[in-house]
Structure formats: C-alpha cells, structure tokens
Image (spheres, helix red, strand yellow):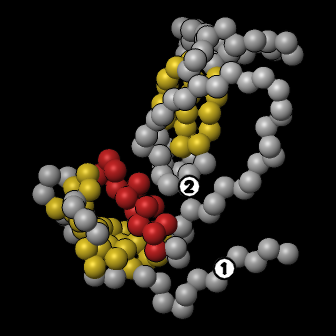
C-alpha cells in the first residue's frame, strides 16, 4: 500500500500580495521570493514555490481592493514512470515549448484532421478507420495544471 506523506502540523504560508501594475509579490513564511510576478503568471509562480517547498503550503492571496483568498496548495507529484517505448526505427525530432510548470503532466496530441464548425457551432466526428494516418503535422500541447495550451507543428 502506498501512503501519502503526512502534511506538517503547521503549514508554511505562501503570501501573494497585489502591487501596482497588476502584479504580485510573493513571500514564503515572510521571506521574499524574487521580483513581482504578473497576474497572468501567478498560478505558475505559486505552483513553483509550492514545489520548491516540497510540502503542502497555505496560500493567501491579497488583492489591491482588500479582497483575500486562502487555500492549500500541494506540490506536484512526480509523474508515474512509463513503460519503455517499443523498439524499432523511430523518426526523432526536437520541439521545445515553454510556460509549463515543473513536473507538470503535459498532454500532446497530433492533429489527425481538421473540421469547420457548422452554422450552429457544432461538429460531428466521424468514426476513424484503425489505419488512419495523420495528414497534417500540427500538434496540440496542453499543461494539465497550468492550463498552458500551445498549437504548434512537428517534423
């Protein structure tokens, strides 16, 4: 049986305080953590700080208008090891995308086909034959925690 590690009796406190220019200063138990972070990158910065703390943290976010939010954030778990890839000839390529959180699981989908939505905004997916080959080399990459989404190309 795998046991989940116990959280400490007193959680470290990760504070995010709004400052001018729609950014936040971060501190962990009163210790400043670098330069202000833009609002668009706040989630990534909080996850990174929780990961570096290596323990659940109490997160307190204070907006400029005085509104505050409190939650508990657990550090990301290491991804489960995967079975080795099948042997045989493989065409290798390297593509780099950024904006993902350290240790985050990233979904990757090669685009098989594209469709245009009808006038009602809906599409109907036909069944794919088991021998379907990707015609396009577009790829969709999605971070499961950060929400970072990228449409790119491979090959």
The single residue placed furthest to the bottom in the displayed view is 9
- Residue receiving disc 2: 103
Choose top left, top right, bottom left or bottom right for residue 111. Answer: top right
Choose top left, top right, bottom left or bottom right for residue 60. Answer: bottom left
The single residue placed furthest to the left in the displayed view is 20
User: Residue at point 79% right, 12% down?
Assistant: 132
Tell whether 58 sits left or right of 83: left
Of badges 2 and 1, the one in the foreground is 2
Which numbered disc flags the more N-terminal residue, 2 or 1?
Answer: 1
User: Residue at point 20% right, 52% down?
Assistant: 22
Label 2 and label 1: CA atoms lie apart by 18 Å
Image spot of residue 82 (x, y percent): 76, 48
**Residue 68 visible in image:** no
Tell whether 56 sits left or right of 136: left
Image spot of residue 110 (x, y percent): 64, 23
Tell whether 86 sits left or right of 51: right
- Residue receiving disc 1: 5
Query: Does 66 appear above or below 93?
Result: below
**Residue 152 visible in image:** yes
User: Residue at point 48% right, 90% down?
Assistant: 10
Choose top left, top right, bottom left or bottom right for residue 136. Answer: top right
Image spot of residue 103 (x, y percent): 56, 55
Q: Secondary structure at mark 2?
A: loop
Q: Which mark is residue 144?
A: none
Quadrant location, the C terminus? top right
User: Residue at point 62% right, 63% down?
Assistant: 77
Query: Around disc 2, counting alpha carbons within 10 Å, would you say few (fewer than 14), some (14 to 19), or many (20 or more)?
Result: some
């Amino acid at each position: 049986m795998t046991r989940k590690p116990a959280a400490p009796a007193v959680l470290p406190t990760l504070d995010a305080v709004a400052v001018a220019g729609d950014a936040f200063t971060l501190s962990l138990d009163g210790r400043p953590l670098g330069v202000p972070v833009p609002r668009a990158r706040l989630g990534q910065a909080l996850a990174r700080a929780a990961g570096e703390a290596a323990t659940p943290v109490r997160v307190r976010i204070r907006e400029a208008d005085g509104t505050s939010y409190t939650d508990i954030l657990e550090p990301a778990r290491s991804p489960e090891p995967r079975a080795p890839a099948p042997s045989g000839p493989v065409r290798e390529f390297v593509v780099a995308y950024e904006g993902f959180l350290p240790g985050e699981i990233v979904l990757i989908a090669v685009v098989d086909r594209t469709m245009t939505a009808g006038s009602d905004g809906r599409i109907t997916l036909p069944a794919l034959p088991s021998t379907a080959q990707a015609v396009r080399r577009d790829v969709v990459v999605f971070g499961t925690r950060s929400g970072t989404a990228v449409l790119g190309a491979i090959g």
